[in-house]
């Protein structure tokens, strides 16, 4: 980086000798001035050789100053005055390479006995400090070369830096290393600096979602006695439909390579219902509405006498299946991104990305990858209700109705890891993808009940568990696995805003689902309490919304 600086400085001196009116009659230049870099830590005292410039073509020897000039006590954003010898041919209006003074466009030319920062350039400002408060005079650092804030080199962007945001004149370049600004090439004499990298950056997105569920195995629950193999009602008849939801994520960049983000998404499905009716509308014929379940081991008393539960479900007027679903997800992730984080779209437009800066485009590299790890909570809840009315087709809570309810709830909490990748197709269009995987502790709760207005059904007399109510609550913990993949596109509509759309799939294994809690023997109360946790489900669907970055 030092060699680059000295080379650039020497070239600049040679160019200035040909263009500056002060040296119009001189073809030679005195020995190249050298100095120590005053910007490294602001502790080293700079030592400068001085040069005397003449109007004629003959160089003179460098006079030895009587005493070294007093060094400035501190380097900051204030101006560094350049003294001028009386009678010197250099004038106050002649611009020179010198430390920039905030808001000033030109700097006075050096003269005999003065400190000389670099050669003057005719009519144009010098290599100035493009990043606010921390000048850098060396070559730009390659993107992704460092994760230390401010460790990158500044860029030699000719022109005046106005409030750290705009550069007038000159060529574009990376300003201030990591955490600095990027001056993208725009209209002549007007470059817009865009923020990238660095701490203090906020980003996030708000998406709408539409998803559905897979993994609902077919299960016949009601049939026509005149055609036993023909199902009248199955569990899939009340499966979850396409449902809407919302997704909100907010992130804060802690440093140039690390960020923390929190997020939530949830689905809000509507309740699903399916019905089956007596095939011929007349009960007690060859074509009646029956259930596939064997309820002969449990009985129910509706106030008119104790009977087998099958008496309410067989030869019924109507069967109804209702299902309710809920899915909520919350995450806290730490994100590591070894490459530049670009927040804005260049003013040069949205055409194909260029190959500037060693193959990277004007808004970061074409391909960007980050890694994440964190903690995730997901709630999966379902209610399953299978009801029968033996006398009419209206469910109003009367004694002739019976309800079989199963409720399961899964609370998954654990560690996840993953990554996100993005490929910049053009300056404004990006294709992205993401993968997450985790192991979770699943705390499951379960409630099964068969009953009606007369209370809960009980195990019939004469068999094990006689008299025990079929009103069973239980809980358990187990390991569950969760994986998520998504792919989409992002299109920038402004310096800080973009729109996105994509497709996501979330698979969960090791959960308790209502259908898996239906026993073969309803009298086995303890067996019913032992939660079946081998369920698996898949949620998938589209998302779309807006993203921001400040």
Image: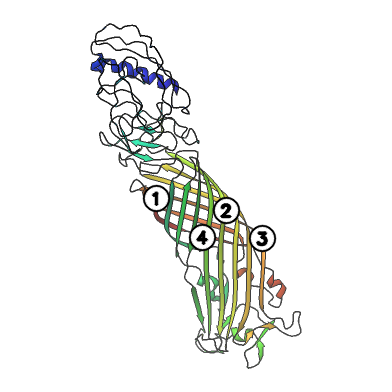
Q: Earlier in the sequence, mark 4 or mark 1?
A: 4
Q: Taking the image as drawn, is residue 226 in sight?
A: no
Q: Which mark is residue 539?
A: 4
Identify the secondary structure beneath mark 2: strand
Label 2 vs 1, first from the N-terminus: 2
Q: Position of residue 155 (x, y in %)?
A: 38, 29
Please report the residue visible at 43 percent of the width from the left and 18 percent of the height from the top.
47
Residue 148 in sight:
yes
Q: Quadrant of the N terminus?
A: top left
How far across and down, in percent of the image, does residue 197 sit?
44, 40
Instruction: Identify the residue position indicated by label 3 in the image.
Output: 478
Numbered tag placed on residue 375 in the rendering: 2
Q: Nearer the viewer, mark 4 or mark 1?
A: 1
Mark nearer the viewer, 4 or 2: 2
Q: Residues within 10 Å of mark 1 (few under 14, many from 20)?
A: some
Tell me: residue 314, above or below residue 362: below
Point 45% across, 57% down: residue: 248
Q: Is residue 117 left or right of residue 515?
A: left
Identify the residue position indicated by label 1 in the image: 548
Q: Secondary structure at mark 4?
A: strand
């Amino acid at each position: 980086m030092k060699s680059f600086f000295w080379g650039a400085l020497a070239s600049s001196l040679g160019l200035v000798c040909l263009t500056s009116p002060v040296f119009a009659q001189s073809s030679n230049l005195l020995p190249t001035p050298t100095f120590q870099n005053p910007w490294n830590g602001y502790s080293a005292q700079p030592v400068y050789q001085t040069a005397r410039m003449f109007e004629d073509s003959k160089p003179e020897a460098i006079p030895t100053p009587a005493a070294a000039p007093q060094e400035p006590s501190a380097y900051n954003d204030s101006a560094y005055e350049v003294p001028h010898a009386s009678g010197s041919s250099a004038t106050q209006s002649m611009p020179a390479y010198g430390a920039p003074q905030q808001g000033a466009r030109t700097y006075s030319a050096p003269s005999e006995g003065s400190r000389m920062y670099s050669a003057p350039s005719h009519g144009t400002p010098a290599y100035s400090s493009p990043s606010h408060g921390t000048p850098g005079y060396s070559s730009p650092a390659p993107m992704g070369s460092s994760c230390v804030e401010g460790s990158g080199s500044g860029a030699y962007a000719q022109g005046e830096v106005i409030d750290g945001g705009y550069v007038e004149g000159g060529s574009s370049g990376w300003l201030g290393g990591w955490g600095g600004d990027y001056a993208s090439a725009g209209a002549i004499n007007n470059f817009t600096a865009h923020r990238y990298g660095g701490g203090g950056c906020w980003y996030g997105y708000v998406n709408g979602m539409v998803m559905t569920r897979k993994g609902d195995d077919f299960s016949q629950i009601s049939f026509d006695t005149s055609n036993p193999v023909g199902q009248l009602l199955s569990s899939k008849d009340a499966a979850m439909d396409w449902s809407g939801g919302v997704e909100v994520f907010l992130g804060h960049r802690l440093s140039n390579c690390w960020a923390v983000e929190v997020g939530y998404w949830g689905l809000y499905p509507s309740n699903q219902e399916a019905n089956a009716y007596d095939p011929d509308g007349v009960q007690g014929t060859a074509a009646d509405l029956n259930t596939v379940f064997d309820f002969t081991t449990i009985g129910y008393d509706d106030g008119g006498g104790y009977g087998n539960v099958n008496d309410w479900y067989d030869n019924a007027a109507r069967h109804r299946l209702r299902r309710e679903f809920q899915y909520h997800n919350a995450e806290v992730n730490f994100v590591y991104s070894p490459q530049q984080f670009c927040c804005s779209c260049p003013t040069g437009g949205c055409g194909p990305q260029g190959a500037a800066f060693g193959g990277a485009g004007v808004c970061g590299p074409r391909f960007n990858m980050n890694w994440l790890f964190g903690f995730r909570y997901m709630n999966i809840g379902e209610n399953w209700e299978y009801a029968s009315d033996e006398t009419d087709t209206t469910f109003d809570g009367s004694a002739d109705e019976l309800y079989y309810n199963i409720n399961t709830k899964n609370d998954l909490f654990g560690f996840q890891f993953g990554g996100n990748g993005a490929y910049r197709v053009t300056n404004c269009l990006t294709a992205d993808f993401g993968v997450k995987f985790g192991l979770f502790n699943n705390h499951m709760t379960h409630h099964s009940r068969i009953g009606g207005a007369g209370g809960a059904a009980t195990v019939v007399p004469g068999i094990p568990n006689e008299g025990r109510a079929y009103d069973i609550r239980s809980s358990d913990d187990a390991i569950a696995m969760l994986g998520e993949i998504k792919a989409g596109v992002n299109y920038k509509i402004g310096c800080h805003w973009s729109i996105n759309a994509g497709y996501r799939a979330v698979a969960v294994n090791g959960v308790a689902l209502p259908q898996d809690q239906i026993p073969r023997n309803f009298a086995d109360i303890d067996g019913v309490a032992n939660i079946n946790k081998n369920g698996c489900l898949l949620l998938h669907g589209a998302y779309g919304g807006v993203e921001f970055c400040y």
